[in-house]
């Protein structure tokens, strides 16, 4: 149970943290409209991620026997997906298209939530990232029972919620000392982490008993 919770938390954090368009949109809205608007934007992205997480988990559940039989081959594939995703995150420019604009102070929280959800949901390629993470961490709580499924998804939600909460909190607190270089550093750190995890999974599969 603890292992399922830990894996769900790590996956939720890794899916939420790359500084892509949604993270930049969240930061932009936090700076221009206030923390509430930024946090609601993050929650919209979180709902989309949860939807794709469940869809991917269900699809992989139908082919669980296939996954178990060919796991030695699928592990390197999952690691390769993570390496490629990490490389694009590492090389990506989170400041591209950065156009912070002052918006009139209006109550548009629902609109921010829906727009963020739709933007995130339009990126169906995230399914490949989920497949890579699920395969790498052998994360399949659906096959272990309802309690494990609830625990794993709850940990995923907690991780994503915590990321958006603390991201908007720190951006709002550091508004006057906001340093864009920090975004690039964070993006490269997250990208490097994906690459390391992916490469580590491939090496552990190819050399299960190095010592």
Image (cartoon, rainbow, N blue to C red):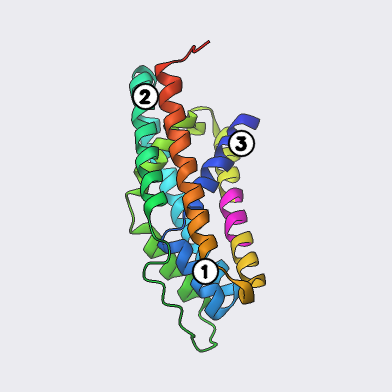
First in sequence: mark 1 vs mark 2: 1
- Provide the major secondary structure of the magenta segment: helix
- Mark 1 sits on what residue? 27
Find residue 176 and report its horizontal and vertical position in percent.
Answer: 63, 77
Mark 2 surroundings within 10 Å by alpha-carbon count, few (fewer than 14), some (14 through 19), many (20 or more) = some
Q: Which mark is residue 67?
A: 2
Residue mark closest to the camera, 1 vs 2: 1
Rendered residue at 47%/35% (across/down) = 196
Can you give x and y, in whole percent of width and height, for residue 163 in the image?
59, 55
Q: Is residue 63 above or below residue 122?
A: above
Residue stretch in magenta: 158-165
Contact between marks 1 and 2 (CB within 8 A): the answer is no
**Residue at (62%, 61%) from the top-left corner?**
165
The image shows residue 100 at horizontal and vertical percentages of 46, 78
Q: Residue furthest front?
A: 181
Task: Judge whether 115 appears above or below 48 on screen.
Answer: below
Seen in the image, is 57 located left or right of residue 153?
left
Front residue of 135/20: it is 20
Marks 3 and 2, how far apart at CA: 22 Å
Q: CA distance from mark 1 to mark 2?
A: 39 Å
- Left/right placement of residue 123 relative to residue 20 reads left
User: Which residue lies under the disc numbered 3?
Assistant: 6
């Amino acid at each position: 149970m603890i292992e399922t919770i830990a894996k769900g938390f790590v996956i939720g954090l890794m899916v939420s943290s790359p500084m892509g368009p949604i993270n930049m949109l969240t930061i932009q809205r936090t700076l221009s409209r206030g923390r509430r608007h930024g946090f609601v934007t993050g929650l919209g992205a979180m709902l989309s991620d949860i939807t794709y997480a469940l869809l991917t988990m269900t699809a992989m559940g139908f082919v669980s026997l296939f996954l178990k039989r060919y796991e030695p081959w699928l592990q390197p594939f999952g690691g390769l997906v993570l390496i490629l995703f990490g490389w694009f995150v590492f090389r990506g420019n989170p400041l591209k298209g950065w156009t912070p604009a002052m918006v009139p102070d209006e109550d548009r929280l629902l609109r921010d939530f829906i727009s963020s959800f739709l933007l995130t949901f339009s990126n169906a390629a995230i399914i490949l990232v989920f497949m890579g993470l699920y395969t790498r961490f052998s994360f399949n709580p659906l096959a272990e029972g309802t309690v494990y499924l609830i625990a794993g998804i709850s940990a995923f939600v907690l991780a994503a919620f915590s990321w958006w909460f603390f991201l908007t909190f720190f951006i709002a607190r550091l508004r006057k000392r906001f340093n864009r270089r920090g975004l690039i550093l964070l993006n490269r750190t997250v990208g490097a982490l994906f690459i390391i995890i992916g490469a580590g999974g491939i090496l552990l599969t190819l050399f299960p008993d190095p010592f």
